[in-house]
Amino acid sequence: MNAVLGGRELFSDALQDAVWLRLLFGAAGFEPDFSIRRNDARILISQAAADRGLDETTYARAEASAAELEPRLHRAEADARHLAFVWNIIARATLAT
């Protein structure tokens, strides 16, 4: 993880992620070379959409599509898939404009 993520800042919507990461690295005898900051991914994606000039209607359609095709189930994998789906729609909409 250090080789790939070193010097970067990661975002997580769960404070416990940093706790578990510290435990894992401690057990392995390493310190992470990256940081984790708590932030809601939906806020980051919404800001990215606004920064790219996408209107609220486009963003709402992205959220609706993601909710239908990749619903949030309050499980890490399902939530990550949902957020990635919204991000991909936003990224493609940006490229199309």
Image (tube, grey):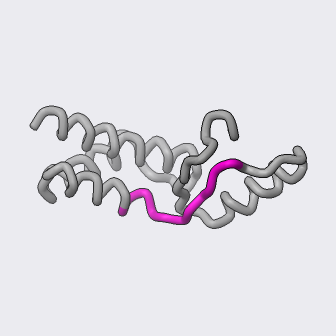
Residue 19 falls in image quadrant:
bottom right
Q: In the drawing, does residue 57 fall left or right of residue 83?
A: left
Q: Residue at x 86, y 53 (%)?
A: 26
Q: Which residue reaches farthest front?
A: 7
Residue 71 in percent (x, y) is at 41, 48
Q: Residue at x 54, y 65 (%)?
A: 38
Q: In the drawing, does residue 26 fall left or right of residue 84?
A: right
Q: Residue at x 51, y 45 (%)?
A: 78
On-image quarter of the N terminus? top right
Q: How many marks?
A: 0
Residue 14 in percent (x, y) is at 59, 63
Q: Is residue 42 magenta?
A: yes
Q: Is residue 38 magenta?
A: yes
Residue 45 in percent (x, y) is at 33, 54
Q: In the drawing, does residue 90 fall left or right of residue 73?
A: left
Q: Residue at x 43, y 57 (%)?
A: 41
Q: Which residues are magenta?
A: 33-43
Residue 44 in percent (x, y) is at 37, 58
- Image height of 48 relative to 68, above or below: below
Residue 42 falls in image quadrant:
bottom left
Q: Which residue reaches farthest left?
A: 97
Nearest the viewer among 68 and 18 is 18
- Image height of 58 relative to 46, above or below: above
On-image quarter of the C terminus? top left
